[in-house]
Every structure is written in C-alpha cells, then in structure tokens.
Image (cartoon, rainbow, N blue to C red):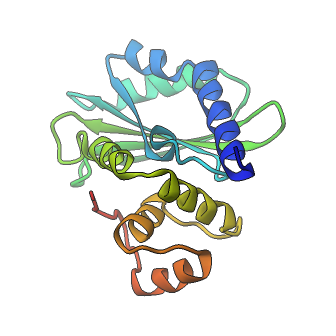
Amino acid sequence: MNDILRLALQNQEKARKIIEELQLIPIWKSVGADPHLVGSLRMGLLMKHRDIDFHIYSDPLEVSQSFAAIQKMAKNPAIRQIEYKNLSDTEEKCIEWHAWYTDHTNELWQIDMIHILKGSFYDGYFEKMADRIVALLTPETKQLILQLKNDTPESEKIMGVEYYQAVLRDGIRNYADFEKWRIHHPVNGILHWIP
C-alpha cells in the first residue's frame, strides 16, 4: 500500500472513532432524527482535510429537536466550538451545525451536521451523489483524487465534489491541471453534480 492510501485510511479510521466516541448517530436518533453519513468519508475519499459530514432528516424540522441533540453532543469536552445557522425558511430547508472537535493528538476536526426536512429537495441527494461516485471509482481514479487532495495546500478551501468532477468527468490527472480547471469551473454555493 502506498503512503497516500495509508494516510487516507488512517484518517478515515480516526474519523470513524470520533463518530463513535461522540455517539453522533445514537444522539440524533434519540431525538427522533435519521442521521446519514455523506461526503468524503462515506466515499472512502477522506484525505488530510479533517472533516466529517452528516445529513440528518426529520419531519417536522424543529429547532428544539436540533438543539436537544447538539446539547447532548456538547457535553463531550473535546467539542471546542459549535456554530448554528437556521436555513429552514430557504429552499435548503435545513438547520446547519458545525462543530469543532480536538482529538487526542490535538488535531482539530470539523463535523458538519446538516439537519434537513425529510421529503425536501435535498433529502437523499448527497447520498445518491456519493453512491454514484463510489460506483464509478477505479483504483486509479481513487488514487488520483486522494493525491490531488494531498497536494492541495492547507490554506486552500476546495469542495470535495470539485475533485470528483475534475477527475471523473474531465480527466484531470495532476494538481497543476486541477488549478487551471478550477479557474474555468468556479463554484458559487452548492454544486449540483451527480455523475
């Protein structure tokens, strides 16, 4: 196994341990919500950007329910900061939570929990995207995506779907070409793309 794959697997294992330690899934279920792992961890494409993404569904979407779950999670002393955004009156029909967790090696992880109204537009959308990407990955394209993520400077904030689109749809094979590709494919807001 090469170093890129080894690092990716190590970080993915750390992420799964954090989910377990925080009891993230049982906590959301305890308030009647349905949590689903999405994003790079779901796809096996988490690299060095330490983030964990969940979409959580309920109907009705209640602020009090959302706060009840977060209150339970915030009892863990490794949770250092929590950010809240109420977008329930937008087309996104969600409450956004962003939590920052410090692991035992003092590395900071961001945990994005998007609490979404069941049956709204984004219900299941990113799960479908992730599953479709996984279905199309080959060992070569997985390695390329992980390499691009590894080559990305820490100061750059790039959405995961940009890497997937560049490699899987447009055949990008190195970071220099990826930088040029991004100039011609700017992202504003949510990127809707399912291969």
- Nearest the eye: 117 or 18: 18
Residue 93 located left or right of residue 2: left
Residue in the foreground of this view, choosing between 14 and 155 = 14
Residue 77: x and y, percent? 73, 25
Tell me where residue 79 appears, x and y as whole percent. 67, 32
- Determine which quarter of the picture holds residue 113: top left
Q: Residue at x 47, y 74 (%)?
A: 172
- Relative to 122, say whether 167 is above or below: below
Number of numbered callouts drawn: 0
Q: Which residue sits furthest right? A: 105
- Give the vertical position of 44 relative to 192 (above or below): above
Horizontal side of residue 127 vs 109, given as left or right: left
Quarter placement of the C terminus: bottom left
Q: Position of residue 186 (x, y in %)?
A: 41, 80
Instruction: Examine the image and state in which quarter residue 10 appears.
Output: top right
Identify the image quadrant of the N terminus. top right
Which residue is located at x 59 percent, y 56 percent? 146
Residue under the point 44% across and 28% down: 67
Vertical comparison of 129 with 57: above or below: below
Please name the residue shown 68% across and 32% down the image: 14
Q: Would residue 160 appear left or right of 102 to someone viewing this image?
A: left
